[in-house]
């Protein structure tokens, strides 16, 4: 009788520990997902990529500059809603509001107009 009780207690103990470990792994996996935002900045008229455009993630200290293809990217972002601003010498500043980073989000592109 004691042996049967001991086996049942061990079975429940092991089941509980495996269930707890599985829950922790799922939680850690969700926390380790890296959210990002990326996009491209082009000239509105010529559609050419703009190099060195400053893209600011408003409300944070994050800043990105476009590469030779006009691409920018922000990594390691927290979930939430953001505002992006792109500025470049001799172009009008452009802002995109209500941007939400996710694992599958599409690009947030800018088309800048030359300042007159």
Image (cartoon, grey):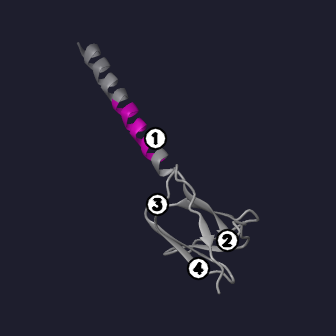
Q: Residues at badges 4 and 3 in contact (C-beta under 8 Å)?
A: no
Q: Residues at badges 4 and 2 in contact (C-beta under 8 Å)?
A: no
Residue corresponding to mark 1: 25
Tag 1 or tag 4, which sits nearer the N-term? 1
- The residue closer to the viewer here, 73 or 23, is 73
Q: Residue at x 46, y 47 (%)?
A: 30
**Relative to 12, residue 72 above or below:** below
Rounded to the nearest angstrom, the CA distance separating label 4 from label 2 is 15 Å
Rounded to the nearest angstrom, the CA distance separating label 1 from label 3 is 25 Å
Indicate which label's residue lies in the foreground, 4 or 1. Answer: 4
| Residue 59 falls left or right of residue 46 | left
Tag 3 or tag 1, which sits nearer the N-term? 1
Indicate which label's residue lies in the foreground, 2 or 3. Answer: 2
| Residue 56 falls left or right of residue 2 | right
What count of labels does the image hold?
4
Tag 2 or tag 4, which sits nearer the N-term? 2
Q: Sort mark 2 into few (<14), some (14-19) or many (20+) by Cα contacts within 10 Å.
A: few
Residue corresponding to mark 4: 93
Q: Which residues are magenta?
A: 16-28
Rounded to the nearest angstrom, the CA distance separating label 4 from label 3 is 21 Å
Quarter of image, res 87: bottom right
Residue 89 pos. (x, y %): 69, 83
- The residue closer to the viewer here, 76 or 106, is 106
Q: Residue at x 43, y 62 (%)?
A: 80
Is residue 7 one of those drawn in magenta? no
Quarter of image, res 76: bottom right
Q: Residues at badges 4 and 1 in contact (C-beta under 8 Å)?
A: no
Residue 60 pos. (x, y %): 52, 73
Disc 4 secondary structure class: loop
Residue corresponding to mark 2: 45
Residue 18 pos. (x, y %): 40, 31
């Amino acid at each position: 009788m004691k042996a049967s009780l001991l086996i049942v207690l061990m079975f429940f103990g092991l089941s509980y520990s495996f269930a707890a470990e599985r829950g922790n792994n799922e939680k850690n996996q969700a926390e380790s997902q890296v959210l990002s935002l990326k996009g491209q900045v082009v000239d509105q008229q010529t559609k050419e990529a703009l190099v060195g455009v400053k893209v600011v993630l408003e409300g944070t200290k994050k800043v990105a500059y476009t590469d030779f293809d006009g691409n920018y990217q922000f990594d390691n972002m927290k979930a939430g809603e953001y505002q992006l601003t792109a500025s470049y010498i001799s172009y009008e500043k452009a802002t995109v509001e209500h941007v939400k980073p996710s694992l599958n989000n599409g690009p947030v592109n800018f088309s800048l107009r030359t300042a007159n």
